[in-house]
Amino acid sequence: MVVRMMAGAVFFWEGILKFVYANQGVGRFTKLGLPFPVFTANFVGGLEIVGGLLLILGLGTRLITIPFIIEMLVAMLSTKPRLFLGTLPLPPPPVPPQVGIWAVLHEVRSEYAQFMSCLFLLISGPGPWSLDRPLRSDEEEKRDSLVEATARRPPLTVRRPSEAGEESWSDARRVVRR
């Protein structure tokens, strides 16, 4: 739940910033040379606002993480290689280093965190405190409860027969079968 709400909040406020500050939306997309910067910035901003709210509420969690994962990959791949090479059309980061691998690692932190959060949510689902929970089918509930029960079961241990012959291997096999 915490990861879902954190990722949702970041997407939500980043989407609002794309509309409030032109340099974060259309201006940034134009400088990066993305196609149709006005449409793209508005689409991405709207996706982040609506999708961020959906993540916060836990509604359609797995579905909304897919476009967010794609968005973060595009963000990383469209800006960070040029930052590494020193050819990014945006102003360099305000703190050293300004180009190279360390600049890339510093600047990619936000996209990387959001990417990993969405990947986690895609795999694990929204969690019990979400609006997705009451909307799930009985079959999905049974599947998840079976997975949870299996995960909680203690592992089987096979004991080796003692040297004194107190029990045999066949006794040990019977213990495992139970």
Image (cartoon, grey):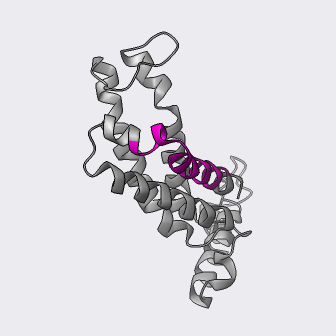
The quadrant the C terminus occupies is bottom right
Name the residue nearer the viewer: 35 or 151. Answer: 35
Q: Which residues are magenta?
A: 6-26
Q: What residue is drawn where x is 63% and y is 82%? A: 141
- The image position of residue 118, as x and y in percent, is 52, 54
Q: Position of 81 compared to 23: left or right?
A: left
11 falls in the magenta region: yes
Q: Nearer the viewer, residue 168 or 43?
A: 43
Q: Is residue 68 above or below residue 75?
A: below
User: Residue 57 colored magenta?
Assistant: no
In the rendered image, the vertical position of residue 128 relative to residue 71, given as above or below: below
Of all residues, the one furthest to the top in this rendering is 96
x, y percentage for residue 159?
67, 54
Q: Give the total number of marks visible in the rendering.
A: 0
Q: Find residue 100 and report its image quarter.
A: top left
Q: Position of residue 64 (x, y in %)?
A: 49, 65
Question: Can residue 160 be seen here?
Answer: no
User: Is residue 73 toward the left or the right of residue 133 in the image?
Assistant: left
The residue under the point 47% across, 42% down is 22
Task: Residue at 70% x, 54% y: name it.
Answer: 165
Res 166 visible: yes
Query: Considering only vertical position in the picture, is 107 above or below 72?
Result: above
* Figure quadrant of the N terminus: bottom right
Position of residue 115 in the picture relative to residue 127 (left or right):
left
The secondary structure that most of the magenta stretch takes on is: helix
Q: Position of residue 24 (x, y in %)?
A: 48, 40
39 relative to 17, above or below: below
